[in-house]
Amino acid sequence: MGGREVEKLIAVWKGFVARQHEGEGRFMLNPDKERVAMLAQGVLSNGKNHGLGYCPCRMTTNRREEDLKLICPCNFKAQKAWREKGECWCSLFVRAER
Ligand code: SF4
């Protein structure tokens, strides 16, 4: 997966972060740039191999309804990982006030 595609996806994620509403539970991209780039590679390769940009660290189920919930970015604030650790399952997005 080319560096340019990775950069483009990271720019999309930055836009997602910038568009969040004011209030509690604000999040940001993980400051670990290598991790973010690695996750972007994973999402891009899922897009290439499975047709959609699924989460790089969860398994798809082959049930469309379920799998649509795995498209990144997912509804990660509903996850246990967010409640317990303040991070999405893959630590791509992390709580801003840490
Ligand atoms: S857990 Fe994180 S990396 Fe995985 S789909 Fe959700 S937002 Fe994306």
Image: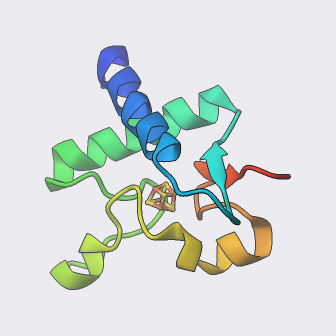
Is residue 47 toward the left or the right of residue 25 in the image? left
Instruction: Point out residue 41 in the picture as x, y percentages from the top left corner.
Output: 40, 35
Q: Is residue 45 left or right of residue 72?
A: left
Residue 77 position, x and y percent, is 57, 72
Farthest right residue in view? 98
Quarter of the view holding residue 9: top left
The tally of labels here is: 0
Q: Give the colouring mode of the picture.
A: rainbow
Q: Residue at x 41, y 56 (%)?
A: 73
Side of 65 relative to 92 (left or right): left
Q: Quadrant of residue 48?
A: top left
Asked if residue 63 can be seen in this view, the reply is no
Residue at image point 38% right, 26% down: 6
Left or right: where does residue 18 sit relative to residue 54?
Answer: right
Q: Is residue 13 above or below residue 71?
A: above
- Residue 37 vertical placement versus 54 (above, below): above
- Can you say which quadrant of the picture contains the N terminus? top left
Residue 61 against residue 14 in the figure, above or below: below
Residue at left offset 68%, top offset 52% = 94
Q: Position of residue 27 (x, y in %)?
A: 64, 52
Q: Residue at x 66, y 56 (%)?
A: 26
In front: 23, or 97? 23
Task: Say if residue 18 shows up in the picture.
Answer: yes
The location of residue 19, given as percent across then percent down, is: 45, 47
